[in-house]
Image (cartoon, grey):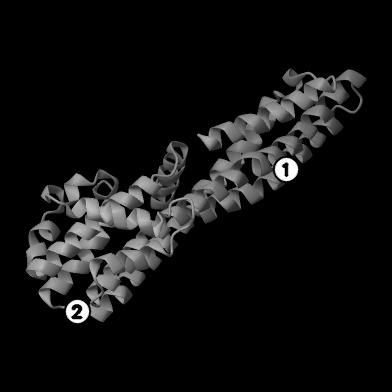
Amino acid sequence: MLIIIGSVVVLVSVLGGFMVAGGNPLVLLQWSEFIVILGAAFGSLITMAPMKIHKDLMAQITGSLKGSRYTKAAYEDMFKALYEMFMLGRRNGMVALEPHIGEPATSSILTKYSGFSSDHHAVELLTGALRPLIDGKIKPDQVGLLLDTEIDTMELEHHKPIDVLSKTSDAMPGFGIVAAVLGIVITMGSINGPVEEIGHHVAAALVGTFLGILVSYGFLGPLAQALTFNGQNEIGFYRTLAKALSGFATGMAPMMALEVARRGLPADVKPTAEELESMLKAVSK
């Protein structure tokens, strides 16, 4: 929602200031300039990356319009789900977790906390860490390395669409210059024509430069930064999960493993130590 609000503010401010100065916004509707700039940008975007990156980019943009799902409530759901899992494993042995790891979609624990179980990446990290531990394929102190490797790969994949969008944003002023140069070429071809016609062609050429700069710095650049922040929120959620799992695997008490994970959270989603303790006590009851 903030992305839409910010974009509207940019558009209203630019057009509003132009109109206050006496400009006619209809003059800016130079469709030939739009076709050159936006078409060239879209074509370069297609050339720049494989189809998977384009699909990931569209998914990230769509997700950003909905806002971040990694809120304080989502973290609370994660802590509650992990606490129940950890307590079960501590009381009855790690083998008791096998039904929940083997079929997480029907787990009586995970299905209670939709803020966690609805994130398939988080569930995959959980099951991917505990399953080899239960099977004895890895040592407890290797869980952290296993998770860090997987999360690093996820972070790299998340940045690829953002890099493509950023490069497209950086290219927009250049495409604006291309459109302007083409407009000047047309102007020179009409140099012997009426003054009004020459003025119209020059204005159209300048609109190309204006449009390229506006789209770059007013829309695509800020959108790329918003996607970066969303990616950081997502990876932060997974790293918190990894810290808790690693701590529990190496012998920490469930409460302490979650306390270690809690301390690395940013202030806007971080429950206090008292809130965490109260929350987990309620789960125990």
Residue toward you, 243 or 281:
281
User: Disc 1 marks which amino acid?
Assistant: Val
Q: Amino acid at mark 2?
A: Ile
Toward which corner of the image does residue 6 lie, by quadrant?
A: top right
At 42% from the left edge and 41% from the top edge, which residue is drawn? 63
Percent across and percent down for residue 142 are: 27, 79
Asked if labels 2 and 1 touch by Cβ distance under 8 angstroms, the answer is no
Residue 269 is situated, as x and y percent measured from the top left of the image, at 43, 51
Mark 2 highlights which residue? 138
How many C-alpha atoms fall within 10 Å of the one at disc 1: few (<14), some, or many (≥20)?
many
Q: Position of residue 9 (x, y in %)?
A: 65, 31
* Viewer can see residue 177: yes
- Residue 50 lies left or right of residue 189; in this view the side is left
**At 92% across and 21% down in the image, what residue appears?**
195
* Mark drawn on residue 178: 1
Give the left or right position of residue 63, taking residue 19 as reference. left
Residue drawn at 72 percent across, 29 percent down? 13
Distance from the alpha carbon under mark 1 to that under mark 2: 58 Å
What residue do we see at 57% from left, 32% from top?
5
